[in-house]
Amino acid sequence: IFGRSLGGAVAFRVADYAERNNKPLAGIIVENTFESIGHMVDLLFPFLSPFKGVLLRNKWDSTVLAKRLSVPILYISGDSDEIVPRCQMEDLYGRSKGSSRLPRFHSVKGGTHNETWLQGGKGYWLAIKKFMLDASSIKKI
């Protein structure tokens, strides 16, 4: 499963569903995703922070899922993301280290929120290829 930005939160949710229901899943790849919608509201719309409890129906909190998923996870982070701070990707990666069978972090120099794939060039695609090969060779626990 691949998810970018909000799609990363969806990928975490789908992976969680798959694990809880014993559905096979080789791994997930998330690119420039965030810890939770609440954290992004605090960052981008701080004037709305006091109203998060009323406004947010789905929290899209990946922090809880990252620390319990056992599937391999590749985090691809553009170091010039102008929307999601890189520290949020680093935090999710750190949380995955205790549970994921293959946590991996790939940084893209100059990678922006929507164009990390472009700025990453061949190295971007090679990181994905290597992750997919490694993830497919890992035995399930």
Image (spheres, rainbow, N blue to C red):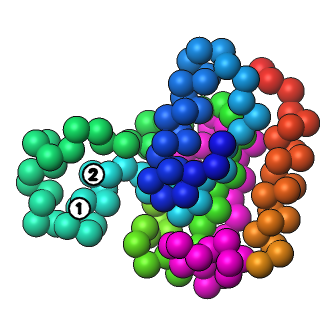
Q: Which mark is residue 72?
A: none
Q: Which residue is mark 2?
A: 38
Which residue is nearer to you in this view: 99 or 108? 108
User: Neighbour class for label 2 at 10 Å: few (<14), some, many (≥20)?
Assistant: many
Indicate whether 110 appears above or below 108. Answer: below
Which residue is nearer to you in this view: 90 or 127? 127
Q: Check if mark 2's residue and mark 1's residue have beta carbons within 8 Å.
A: yes
Residue 73 belongs to magenta span: no
Q: From the top left corner, tell me how far across and down residue 132 is, in percent.
A: 82, 47
Horizontal relation, residue 81 to residue 31: left or right: left
User: Neighbour class for label 1 at 10 Å: few (<14), some, many (≥20)?
Assistant: some
- What segment carries the magenta color? 93-120
Callout 1, which amino acid?
Asp
Q: Which mark is residue 42?
A: 1
Q: From the top left corner, tell me how far across and down residue 124 is, in percent.
A: 76, 69
Q: From the top left corner, tell me how far across and down residue 110 is, in percent.
A: 61, 84
Q: Residue at x 61, y 22 (%)?
A: 19
In terms of image quadrants, where is residue 85?
A: bottom left
Mark yes or no: residue 2 visible.
yes
Residue 111 belongs to magenta span: yes
Secondary structure found at label 1: helix
Indicate whether 50 appears above or below 120. Answer: above
Q: Quadrant of the N terminus?
A: top right
Q: From the top left corner, tell me how far across and down residue 23 is, in percent.
A: 67, 19
